Image (cartoon, helix red, strand yellow):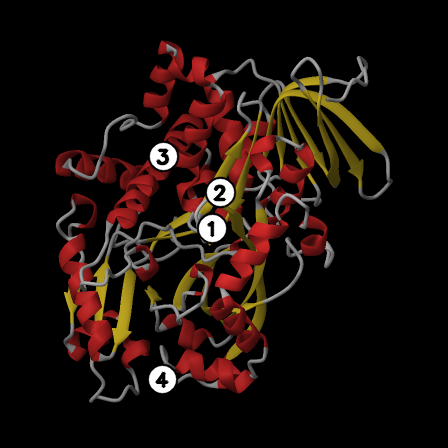
Amino acid sequence: MNTETTSSDPITDVVLIGAGIMSATLGIMLKELDPNLTITIIERLDVAAAESSDAWNNAGTGHSAFCELNYTPQRPDGSVDISKAIGIAESFEVSKQFWSFLAEQYHVEGIQRFINHIPHMSFVWGNENVDFLRTRHAALVQSPLFQGMEYSEDPDQLREWMPLVMEGRDPSQKVAATRMDLGTDVNFGALTRGMFYLLQDKPGITFHFGHEVDKIRRKDDGTWRVRAQNRATGEKRKLRAKFVFIGAGGGSLPLLLASGIPESKGFGGFPVSGQWLKCVNPAVIEQHQAKVYGKASVGSPPMSVPHLDTRVINGQRELLFGPYAGFSTKFLKFGSFLDLPGSIKATNLKPMLIAGAKNLPLTRYLINQVRQSPQDRLNALRDYLPTARAEDWKLEVAGQRVQVIKKDEKQGGVLEFGTEMVSAADGSIAALLGASPGASTAVSIMISLIQKCFPAQAASPQWQARFREMIPTFGQPLADNPELVEQTRAHTSAVLELSVDAPLGSQ
């Protein structure tokens, strides 16, 4: 344990490393729970939400499992497991409640412009996939969270739902789709910056942009000494914190390992990069208004599930397809090629090697993605948009994700595709690793973190009451309560102006 004494270091209650959606959510939630807390946010870039939270670096889908087929795996007997989908759908309802609370509490117009109504659809072809989608739909509509989901194999109906997807398609091809009108498009970059905007005017809040944390050490008194370097001047800044949250996206893993907590041992990361095809023809963009998700290729990571995706970014309607996966040793889009080799330690080498050996199909998939030609990418797009023309689309770089590798007693090492919260036994430091569906479920993730790292306060009557003010259904499961689901959705849709009849991007 570090015995260095630095009594002159400024002390703060909370340090948030990384100015993304997770830190923004945790910061404003903690400040609502205890207005007296002092919070310092440290970000290596000059602006907030420039990495994974930026609109161009993520899918922008309000992940509610309406259309994402990877959240409903098929069992060996042909049935579909919907448990993960229900959990994600419920978490997204929690997120919308918290966002509605902020919109009502602060009456800030900008906080409402991050979300738009957009139908969510799943689309498949081929007899086997059609059977799967039919079975999935039948299972999901048994839950109140998925009431209203439509299913069709009728080409005329599908042409009405998604004309571009059906135009020019072989009429003999067996196709099917589901449609959920309650879907949303979320600009998580705008949401993140909106929350930080609300935070900046509160007392006890300090921001340090353009600073990179290069050392985290626990002191004898249980506090954490955090050192950050000004990337422009090289000046070192030191402070002590009672609690540290590492929410730095792909950059979280190296900082977690640097903390030295026993809970970090065995964790590694596997970076996956992404690219989009962006439509540059306004006439084509205007003809599609939906998020249409398909099935991922065998061996591909969840972030590579193909989708033809209507977005609203900076007030402008966009149409994207992808993402196409790739490989880079960077852990961040604006990171270093030394990130991956630098993260390999004696404590995680074995799990990383074992996980790598067991995921050779993923490696082959990424190699094939890197080797794709422009024609290969166009052919993949034509599976979803048969009449696509190369001149209407431009390749853009998307975000960088780091999939979690961790120790496993039975298998030695496993590769995870979700999110993983790692915290010290005493709750004084925590880090969030992983990717999808993180941003959409950020509020639920942060509630769990607060309950684990601030157990006494979280259980107090004062914090419990405040939780219920921020999330009216706090402590109440939605999955088996149709009336509560309907009531909750009616309220959040009204506050966030998610009218099905409203023009896209009108709010």
Compared across the picture, whether 345 is left or right of 249 comes to right
**How would you rate the neighbour count of disc 1 (Cα within 10 Å): few for under 14, some for 14-19, many for 20 or more?**
many
Tag 4–tag 3 contact (CB < 8 Å): no
Label 3, on which residue? Answer: 100
Q: How far is disc 4 from disc 2 in space, using C-alphas? A: 34 Å
In this rendering, does residue 309 appear at all?
yes
Residue sitting nearer the eye, 381 or 415: 415
Label 2, on which residue? Answer: 191
**How would you rate the neighbour count of disc 4 (Cα within 10 Å): few for under 14, some for 14-19, many for 20 or more?**
some
Q: Position of residue 71 (x, y in %)?
A: 32, 55
Compared across the picture, whether 71 is left or right of 80 comes to right
Tag 1–tag 2 contact (CB < 8 Å): yes
In percent of the image, x 20 and y 89: which residue is there?
A: 172
Q: How far is disc 1 from disc 2 in space, using C-alphas? A: 6 Å
Instruction: Specify the amino acid type for callout 2.
Output: Leu
Mark closest to the chain's N terminus, 3 or 1: 3
In percent of the image, x 23 and y 57: which residue is there?
A: 180
